[in-house]
Amino acid sequence: MVPIKLALKNFMCYRDNVPPLYFEGFHVACLCGDNGHGKSALLDAITWALWGEARAKSDDDLIYLGQSEMEVELEFSVGPNRYRVLRKRTKAGLRRTSQPSLHLFVAGTEGFTDISGNSIRETEQKIIDILRMDYDTFINSALLLQGRASEFSMKKPGERKEVLANILGLSLYDKLEKLAKDYSKEREILQQRLSADIARIEQELSQKPNYEAELQGAQAAISMLGTEVEKQESALTALRQSRESLKFKDEQCREIGMRIEQAERQLQHLNIVAEGHRSKIERYDNILSRYQEEFASIKMRSDDLARQEQDLGKRREDEKEISNQSNLLRSNNAQLKKEMEELKDKIDLLGKGDAECPLCGTELGVEGRKRTMANYETQGREKGDAFRTNHSRIQQKEEELKVTRQEISKLDATITSERTRLERQAGALEKERTEADRSLPQEKEGLERAQKTVEDLRKALQEDIEKKKTILSEIEALPRLERELGDAERAHRELRERERRYRDRLVEVQAILRRFAQLETEREADIKELRSIAEEKSIYDELATAFGKRGTQALIIEKALPEIEEEANRLLGRMTDNRMHLKIESQRDTKKGDTIETLDIKIADELGTRNYEMFSGGESFRVNFALRIALSKLLARRAGAPLPTLIIDEGFGTQDSAGREKLVEAINSIQDDFEKILVITHIEELKDAFPVRIDVIKTEEGSTFSLS
């Protein structure tokens, strides 16, 4: 992985006003600045963008103080391909949750294309696959962090193997060793369980001969009981047939008893029916005997009503005559009233002084007018007297008409009511006579039939009574037969119950014997599985030993040590003018003559060969640096990833001026091994030791940097 461009926003000590950092313009550069100004923060930005890892315990701690979100964008190349990673995070608040995001892009002919996964985890795995290294591999190979260069060298010889194993990623073999031991332990538990199952099965199978003997005994008992059951069933069949015969007769007896009861009820009913016929015959005879007498009485009353109707007719003629007279008087009065009104008009006309006659128009004069007026007044009085006399007679006729009409209405109502009553009485009488003429022969015939049925029924009743007596004498033996049958059935049930128990036990024993057959099969399968598990356990035990620290891990370390020595001595020779070289020994002899596992670092110079611990700070730093670069290259080769970038975040304060110059020369001497080398330091005199310098400064608005 070679970085190309790094852009920050609110990351650690950097705000959103920081320009992008472009890496394409240099091969080796020095990242310098005072402690705490943000040099290492740029490395944290790279690792956080790629793997989501940095020095902080929490991602929220990486956000610039007072801000709620941050983002880092990193462009880098792997081989001929160019990629871009954009990682963001929003801090959780009162009304929002933490919102991380990660996007991965690949460059093409038409720009960058998003190739992110469906989740952050998937995208991070894609990045690891592209880089062919994870965070731990990166910080142990491409990145030399402060204090980590001497991590391997400063350990005691007995602990260096563990450090080397961690750097080489041999913890995988520890996991495989533990996994093999766990599998071996599981197989051991399975062995114990199978051994216990086999012992239990053997214990159960020891009872098999007893059950086989019990099976034979049960089969013999069932055969003997079967013969006894057949004999009892024959006897039971005979008893049941006799009982059924008697029960049939008992049923016949009950049926005869019901017929007797029914016949007695029929006799009682027929007697009631016959008595009804007699009562009706007597009633019909009475109706026919009094018919003529009642009919004559109705005829006499009808004649009387006819005379009353004649009188009613006369009264109606009187009413008509009175009405005609009243109408004539009313007509006369109407004429008289008209004539009196005409006389009044004439008198009024003459009273106005006219001398002409109202009728002929002749001149009358005063005397003539007076005579004429006197004549008209006399005629008026006469007509008025006649009008009043007629009016008095009209009132008299009206009173007579009212009385006559009341008498007619009362007489008419009386005649109508009596006529209706007589007609109803005559109809009822005629109806009774007709019914009597029609029904009397039927009732006499019904009486004869009822008497004949009673006679036949009594004869049949007597026969049933005699038959019932005969059957009762025959079924007296039924209770005794029931008792005998009950005893026989109880004995049969007991025998059947014994047979059933034997058969149930036979089924149980057969099931147990089948179970024994299954157990024998299971035992063979368990023995076979036990052998297989023992073989598997032996394999896992061997694997646990192979994956252990004395197995594959020791072989890998033994194979890696010559590579480390060769690369470290190559770098150490450049830094010391071939004055120093080292050797790593993995075993040493004890005073007792034994050989123990160790990892001693022997360093030789012009004064001789000494242990690492005997050298000064500057000399030991050069040894540390050489070993660390050698380990980084080895780790990169083992991961299958190239190591084009080297970032050195180590202190140079332990070196004197000559040592620092040698260290710079060593770095420059290995620059052809890397596409990009970035050295981080705060020492002032080293700032100009490299062709390109990235100055990091801290301002009130956050850290920033410049390229020179």
Image (cartoon, rainbow, N blue to C red):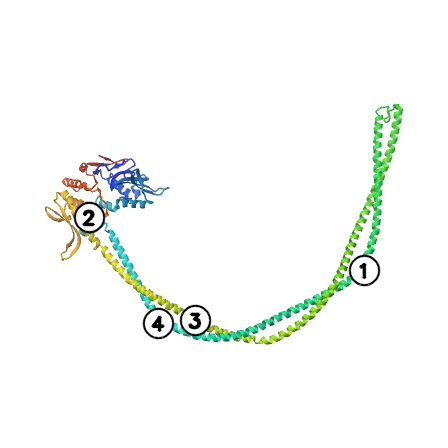
Relative depth, front residue between 158 and 200: 200
Q: Is residue 245 left or right of residue 202?
A: right
Relative depth, front residue between 441 and 189: 441
Measured Cα–Cα span from mark 3 to mark 4: 21 Å
Q: Quadrant of residue 104?
A: top left
Measured Cα–Cα span from mark 1 to mark 4: 119 Å
First in sequence, mark 1 or 4: give its number. Answer: 4
Q: Is residue 602 left or right of residue 487?
A: left
Above or below, 416 against 395 in this view is below
State the residue position of label 4: 209
The answer to whether residue 144 shows anywhere in this view is: no
State the residue position of label 3: 501
Above or below, 345 against 2 in this view is above
Q: Which mark is residue 292?
A: 1
State the residue position of label 2: 152
Measured Cα–Cα span from mark 2 to mark 4: 73 Å
Residue type, numbered disc 3: Arg
Q: Determine whether label 3 and label 1 are within 8 Å by CB.
A: no
Residue type, numbered disc 1: Gln
First in sequence, mark 2 or 3: give its number. Answer: 2
